[in-house]
Amino acid sequence: MDADSLTTNAPVTLTLDAEGGDHAPGEIVAGALMAASPTLRVLLVGRPELVEPLLASGSHEYVELVPSASVVSSKDEPAAAVRKMPDSSIAVGARTVVDGRSQGFVSAGNTGAMLAAALLLIKRAGDIRRPAIVTTLPGMEGPVVMLDAGANADCRPEHLLEFGALGTAYARAVLRISQPRVGLLNIGEEEGKGSELARAAYTELKASGLNFVGNVEGWDLLRNTADVVVTDGFTGNVTLKLLEGCSSSLFVRIKEAASSSAQARMGGLLLRPALRGLRAGLDPEEYGGTYLLGVRGLVVICHGNSTRRAIANALRFGAEALRRGVLSAVDEEFAKITGGRGSAAS
C-alpha cells in the first residue's frame, strides 16, 4: 500500500527483529504484543524455538512469527555478516520489506548490520551516497533535527552536505519549517575551527544554497541556534547518548533532592505534574526509535537496551510515519533541494 494513501487508522504491517537488542527476545516480543492491534500487524522475526514459547499463552491474532535461523551479534562485521548469514533475523526481516510482506522494519539489533541490510537488500534511494539516522532533539524553543546519529562513523565532506539536504527536507516535511537553518556541529563558531573534515564540510555547506548558519557548538545544540545540525555518525551518536545520559541522571538527582526533607517532599508533590510532562519530552523511550533516511522503505533503528515500552512505541512511531506519508514527503522535499537527484524514500 502506498504510504500517501493511508488514513489515520489504516492497517499497517511492520516487521520486528525479535532477536535484536540487549533484552531480546523477551522484551522485544513483549513490546510486539503491547503494540499489535487490528490496525498494526507485526511480523516477528526470530528462531522459533526461542520466540514461540513467549507467544504460547493467549491469543496473538495480530502477531505472526517469521522464522529465522541465526543472529548477527555485536562481534560480527556487519556487511560480511549480512552477506554470509542470509538466514539471520536482520536479513530475513529486511527481505520482508523487499518482498512487500511488510511496509517497514524495526530493530534494536546491531546498527551496522541494520545499515548493511538496508543498503544491500532494501537498497539506497536514488543517488543517495550515505543513508543517515535522523533524530529529533528537544530544543528549548522547539525541536532540533540532528543527523547522522550513528549510521556512518567515518564520513567525507560531501556526506555531511547530503545530511544537510536530508535534514532540511525532513524539517520542512515533518516539522513544517519553511526555511530550516542548517548548522555544523563543531568545537567553535569560527569558520576555521575543527577537524579537517569539519573545515572541509563547512566550505561545502556554505556554498550549497542551503540556509547554512555556520558552526554550532555543543552548548548551543539545544538552544535552537539551528533547526538542523549535521555531523558524522560517530560524533552524532556520542552526542545523542551523552544528552540522554545527562537527562536520565538529572531526573535521578531531582528525585533524590525532592525526597531529602519534608519541605522538599512537599515541593516535589507540587512539581510532580510538570516534571512528568518534562520527563516525557526528554525520554528516548517515548518514541522508541529513529528513522534511517535514504533507503527505499521505512527502517526504524532502536536503542540496543530498549525495553518493551520502547519497542511498542517504536512500532507505533513507524506506523504513524507510514500513515502520515512522512517518507514520501521527505522524498519530495529532497528532490526539490537537490534538483531531482536522489530521494529519501522512493
Image (spheres, helix red, strand yellow):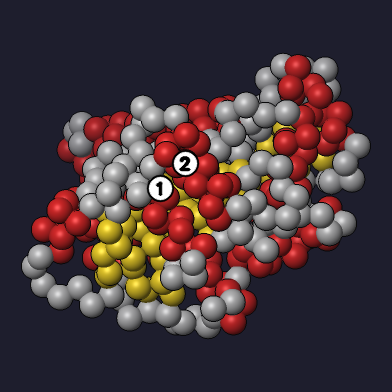
Q: Give yes or no for contact between labels 1 and 2 (Cβ–Cβ under 8 Å).
A: yes
User: How many numbered marks have been drawn onto this rendered protein structure?
Assistant: 2
Q: Is residue 60 above or below residue 327?
A: below
Q: In this orientation, does residue 28 appear?
A: no
The disc label shown at residue 83, or none: 2
Task: Out of 294 and 97, give the one closest to the viewer.
Answer: 97
Image check: 337 left or right of 81?
A: right
| Residue at the image point whose x is 84% and y is 59% from the top | 340
Per the image, label 2 sits on a secondary structure element best described as helix
Q: Residue at x 42, y 39 (%)?
A: 84
Pick the quarter of the image with the N terminus.
Answer: bottom right
Residue 69, position as x, y percentages in the image: 27, 49
Query: Residue 121: x and y, percent?
Result: 53, 52
What is the three-letter code of the residue carrying label 1?
Pro
Q: Residue at x 15, y 75 (%)?
A: 59
Dot label at residue 86: 1
Frontmost residue, 289 versus 120 = 120
Question: Residues under labels 1 and 2: Cα distance?
Answer: 6 Å
Is any part of residue 87 visible from this angle? yes
Near mark 2 (Cα within 10 A), the count class, few <14, some 14-19 or many ≥20, is some
User: Which residue, as the protein is rendered here, is positioned at the far left?
Assistant: 57
Q: Amino acid at mark 2?
A: Arg
Q: Nearer the viewer, residue 325 or 249?
A: 325
Kindly state the secondary structure of the residue where label 1 is placed. loop
Q: Which mark is residue 105?
A: none
Q: Which quarter of the picture shows residue 344?
A: bottom right
